Amino acid sequence: MSTTWYECKVKYRKIDDSGVQKVTTEPYLIDALSYTEAETRINEEMSAYISEEFKITNIKIANFAEIHPFENSDRWFKSKVTLISYDEESGKERKSSMYLLVQANDVKEAYDNTISVMKDSVSDYTVPAISESPIMDVFPYFSNEEEQLEKAQPIVAVDPSLEEVSEEVDSVKEEILEEVNSSQGEISEEVEDI
């Protein structure tokens, strides 16, 4: 299943470097299945960081093809990657662009990180633009959360009479398997005779 990233803008009161409290709006990225889930998840995530009241002012689907965090980096950069393919019939070059969100400390490091992400690409590409993104933080699903969601099954109460039915089905299954095995032996003997 492909990942859908939602950009959520959160408005809250923040104390700036000079100690003055001011209202600010900051964008965050969250991995979710729908707008409703994005709103629920951003509320949960921001409640852990902001003790005061906050408001979600906007939620929209972000246009990032991939998100790549890197350790020891604190800023996010938007890298435009242009894929180049050749149309053999017309002999023309076709270009298609996508945006990656790459974590780095500066533009040069963002470029290097983009190149390292693209190193396994089978098509030719260029990196025509890299700019610092206003995204403050990214909240992906963690792998154990995804596994728990996939493994989540409804709890079914077992009726004692169903156990009896299950035993009957098992015995009928064994009888059928015995018949199939014995008939296969007869068929193979007939084939050998031919």
Image: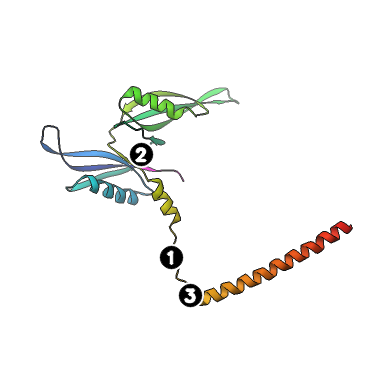
Task: Answer whether residue 2 is magenta in the image.
Answer: yes
On the image, the x and y values in percent for residue 191 come to 85, 58
| Image coords of residue 149 (percent x, y) | 41, 53
Alpha-carbon distance for marks 2 and 1? 36 Å
Span of residues in magenta: 1-5
- Amino acid under label 2? Ala
Lateral position of residue 125 relative to residue 35, left or right: right
Given residues 120 and 82, the one toward you in this image is 120
Front one among 144 and 138: 144
Where does the image place residue 160, in percent across and percent down from the top left? 50, 76
Q: Quadrant of residue 126?
A: top left
The amino acid on which the numbered mark 3 sits, given as a three-letter code, is Asp
Real-space Cα separation, disc 3 to disc 1, in angstroms: 13 Å
Q: Which residue is mark 1?
A: 155
Q: Earlier in the sequence, mark 3 or mark 2?
A: 2
Q: In percent of the image, x 31 and y 49: which residue is there?
A: 41
Residues packed near mark 3 inside 10 Å, few (<14), some (14 to 19) or many (20 plus): few
Residue occupied by mark 3: 159
Does label 2 or label 1 sit earlier along the sequence? 2
Structural crowding at the residue carrying mark 2, measured as other residues with C-alpha within 10 Å and reported as few (<14), some (14–19) or many (≥20): some
- Which element carries disc 2, helix, strand or loop? loop
Residue 58 pos. (x, y %): 27, 44
- Number of labels in the image equals 3
Corner quadrant of residue 98: top left
Q: Amino acid at mark 1?
A: Ile
